Image (tube, rainbow, N blue to C red):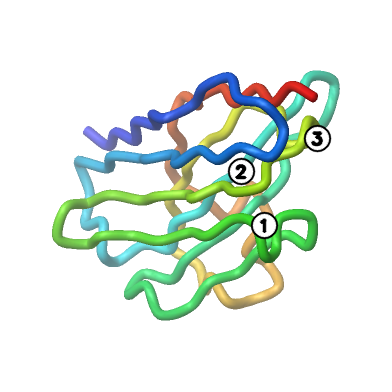
Amino acid sequence: QVQLMESGGDSVQAGGSLRLSCAASGYTYSNYCMGWFRQAPGKEREGVAAISAGGGGTSYAESVKGRFTISRDNAKNMLYLQMNTLTPEDTAMYYCAAGRLTCGSVFWSQLGRYNFWGQGTQVNVSS
């Protein structure tokens, strides 16, 4: 049974940092591109970042470039998102996802290309 479980969400002030984690199980983790997505109230879910199966390639949304860093540990089946200089616009539910796609392609942020999803972890950033 495939399971993705996010953790690390919290309430922080603007300018603060958070590190999200995603624990994966039930499939061959190292074969899958992994992504972080987020959904704010009243908005569509959007791609935040993705990392290739081997960890050598990453993609980021323009809104988080230079502030967020995605990483993975294939030995531990873990995915991470280091978020720095948070702003209220980063407030959202954050989801991790796994997909058999080329993470470095222009399609990395398309939700339909991901096979497995977690339940999400909430991030609230106050001004």
Percent coordinates x, y for residue 6 in the rendering: 40, 32
Question: Which residue is farthest left?
Answer: 75
Check disc 2 and report the residue beneath it. 37
Residue 10 as seen in the image, left or right of residue 45 = left
Percent coordinates x, y for residue 79 in the rendering: 36, 51
- Give the residue displayed 62% in from the left and 64% down from the top: 108
Structural distance between the alpha carbons of marks 3 and 1: 19 Å
Structural distance between the alpha carbons of marks 2 and 1: 8 Å
Three-letter amino acid code at the position of disc 3:
Glu
Percent coordinates x, y for residue 54 in the rendering: 32, 75
Check disc 3 and report the residue beneath it. 89
Residue 89 as seen in the image, left or right of residue 49 = right
Q: Secondary structure at mark 3?
A: helix
Structural distance between the alpha carbons of marks 2 and 3: 14 Å
Quadrant in the picture for residue 59: bottom right
In the image, residue 72 above or below residue 78? below
Percent coordinates x, y for residue 45 in the rendering: 72, 36
Three-letter amino acid code at the position of disc 1:
Ser
- Give the residue displayed 28% in from the left and 49% down from the top: 78
Check disc 1 and report the residue beneath it. 109
The label nearer to you, 3 versus 1, is: 3
- Give the residue displayed 69% in from the left and 40% down from the top: 15
Three-letter amino acid code at the position of disc 2:
Phe
Looking at the rendering, in which quadrant would you find the N terminus? top left
Q: Sequence-wise, which precedes: disc 2 or disc 1?
A: 2
Foreground pick, 1 / 70: 70
Which numbered tag is attached to residue 24? none
Q: Secondary structure at mark 2?
A: strand
User: CB of mark 2 within 8 Å of CB of mark 1?
Assistant: yes
Quadrant in the picture for residue 110: bottom right
